Amino acid sequence: MRSLIDVIRAGRTVERHHPWPRVAVDGDSWLAVAGLLADGQLSLRGLWGEPSRVHMAIGAEDGSDVCVISLDCPDRRFPSIAAHHRPALRLERTIHDLFGLEAIGTPDSRPWLDHGRWQIRFPLGEQRAAAAPDAPPYQFLAAEGEDLHRIAVGPVHAGIIEPGHFRFTASGEAVVRLEERLGYTHKGVEGLMAGSSVERAARLAGRVSGDSTVAYALAFSQAVEAAQQIAVPPRALWLRALMAELERLANHLGDIGAICNDASFALMHAHCGVLRERVLRAADIAFGHRLMRDVVVPGGLAHDIADAGPAAIRAALGEIRRHFPALIDLYDNTASLQDRTVGTGSLNPALARQFAAGGYIGRASGRNHDARRKPGYRPYDVLRFEVPVLDDGDVNARVWIRIREVEQSLSLADQIMDGLESGPVRVPLQSPAEPTEGMAIVEGFRGDILAWLRLDGDRIERCHLRDPSWFQWPLLEAAIEGNIVADFPLCNKSFNCSYSGHDL
Amino acid sequence: MVVISDILVQLVQMTLVLLLAPLFTGFVRKIKARLLRRKGASVFQPYRDLLRLLRKEVVLAENASWLFRVTPYITFAAIWVAAALVPTFATGLQFSWSADLIAIVALLGSARFFLALAGMDVGTSFGGIGSSREVMIAALAEPAMLLMVFCVALIAGSTQLSTVATFMASSEVGLRISLGMAMIALIMVALAENARIPVDNPATHLELTMVHEAMILEYSGRHLAMIEFGAFLKLLFYVSLIICVFFPWQITIVGAGPASYLAGAGAYIFKLAVASLLLAAFETATAKMRVFRVPEFLGAALMLGLLGTLLRFVSRSF
């Protein structure tokens, strides 16, 4: 079998792609990489298309050595990766829906994002096609056996949550199979970005998934800065990290409470909600927006932190430090709650590894990976923090990873505010004559967000944003198997995958 | 004269439970909200909800049968009659002579039977899930309830609630282990039957975890109002039953003066307030249990009822 080094040597390294190499390869090398992925020697970080080309981001299991492999497919066909490595499946189906590129040998040729409700097919492809008026209804996977029954949930739910359809096949209360159907919140972000200015695209990037707006803006901005080879002033880098940690804090606090609420333990939800609100208000004072939207922009920050900001953030962090330990005790000592979370929705570490699941889902199943560490980005190289890892893989482990990350984020936010230098927070962008490509991997609260783009002057030619949920949603299907139907909301909340970021 | 006063007491109590039921639920919700540091809706919100639902149009599924339409009224009527059989502030109810505790269990059983059928009538998956879970819970709660009835009846010498309450209020009773067991059993059954935490969550929005709510997902308008009202009444009924059998202090015994009726009513309201506080505190401090833990929970209630009954046979002093 050929190693990755051989593949890269055989291919043609594309110029002006930063910070990691991009290699144009032929079909054989493409398949060789698929073999390496299937072997577990590499992990898949992303797979996306262009009108007549497919790209695949790969890396070592620990997150380092990122590399993009590109395959030209003028006949609009490419060898399927999913045939060898299942995590690529939904990405390939999406490439087909958006670009009309066909994966040869794919184990599943059903559409994914395209529900037949768009006016056209292949909206980003070279040849758009009119939507087929009599497209066959979506075929859910079969599950056969005595006494099995199906439960269809969503896309409209009893509560106010994002839309997604879940098709359960259950034997009594036990789940035999769960199949997800997503794509209801497809907004065509990548289509909107193509041809738009960097500023407009940055605003779009911040709107891909509302709860991760800082992380998305950060990933996009880092990719632009990498493409243009700009160095952002240190103060902007540190403030970006501060915002990212505040976002992580707010979301983790909200999640911890919401998971307990799904076990009907509203007390945790209420108290965590108060702490989350404190973080959001401090963010509002410091950065002018509760979720800190549109503050991170390519080249730095839209504006500096407000004068009252550091004091407000310190007050919020202080309050969390005072009250959070009591909430951890409450979580840990409520037997009825522990009974629900311990052992529920176990995710096998081998699957987490295969899918390269990021964030708390991967770390709760023994995957020691954090994009802040590897591949790593500034200023986390000089900040002290630990990456908590557990092996249990159940709902309880995912709650504990969040609890530990809250503690780490508190410490990081303090370190950042102590080490903050004065200086400018923005540098102007350039407008290079030749097209350049940039890429970034950023740790959002859910996991690693990948941004890849090609700039043509000050216009975006093509931008792809890959949400961590792409590699987490399929794992939810695996984690729920063997559990009971009534435990699904609890498992789902402990995963808390993004609908919007996934559907894009 | 006695008959007239009995009828009067009966009418007043029937009206009282009807008027108090939404308030009691509203009060429990308010306390739960306060315990969660929320303001919470007004205690009168359940009345407004009922009025709102009554004014709203009924949306019926195309394949809904007559059963689906009559069930709200049947369940409401059955629960109301059951509630009318429980002495709240005065014993000597007119209806007491025609129906006892076992009849009450049967009335509640019929209400549930119709509701479970209606849940499956439209053929949605949630209705089916709700009905199957509800029946699983009921199959265990009903025997536990009956054993509790036997235990109390053995001690009081009657299954008729006015007599039981009169006996329990007298000084003959004293502290009895079997009564304590029966009380715990009844409280556990009451939590399960009223879809409270830890068996069900009355405030959940998660379709897949619902029990009672899943059965009634398809109801709307006045039908939903009747079912909701029935649920309010049922909660008040169980609390009144626990009060009447185990804490009948200050209850007015037949033949007492008018002042006694006032004191009885005051004591009843006070006991309800205490009960709502306890219920809200318990629900806030507990998470919901897994569906398959419910049989264990109700099995414990059944065993307690059984032990209480057996102990009575072992020695009369229990």
Image: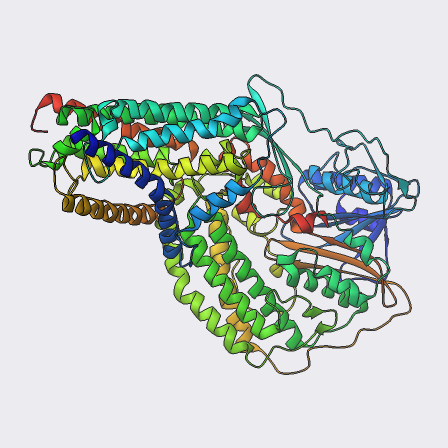
Q: Residue furthest top?
A: A146
Position of A18 relative to A172 (above/below): below
Please state the total of marks drawn on the protein image: 0
Which residue is found at the position 65% from the left and 61% from the top?
A213
Colour mode of the rendering: rainbow
Would you say A309 lies left or right of B201 here? right
Name the one closer to the observer, A36 or A503. Answer: A503
Q: On the rendered structure, is B1 left or right of A23?
A: left
Q: Is residue A434 left or right of residue A379?
A: right
* Res A92 visible: yes
Compared to residue B131, the image places residue A296 above or below, namely: below
Q: Residue at x 48, y 44 (%)?
A: B51
Q: Is residue B273 above or below residue A321?
A: above
Left or right: B27 in relation to A168:
left
Q: Nearer the viewer, residue A35 or A430?
A: A430
Q: Position of residue A496 (x, y in %)?
A: 57, 48
Q: Quadrant of residue A202?
A: bottom right
Where the N terminus of chain A falls, by quadrant? top right
- Residue A360 at what x, y percent from top left? 55, 51
Q: Position of residue B8 (x, y in %)?
A: 24, 35
Q: Quadrant of residue A371?
A: bottom right
Q: Residue at x 54, y 23 (%)?
A: B121
Question: Residue B73 location in percent, x, y?
Answer: 45, 29
Nearer to me, B154 or B315: B154
Q: Is residue B184 visible?
A: no
Query: Dividing the picture into quarters, in which one does residue A472 lie?
Result: top right
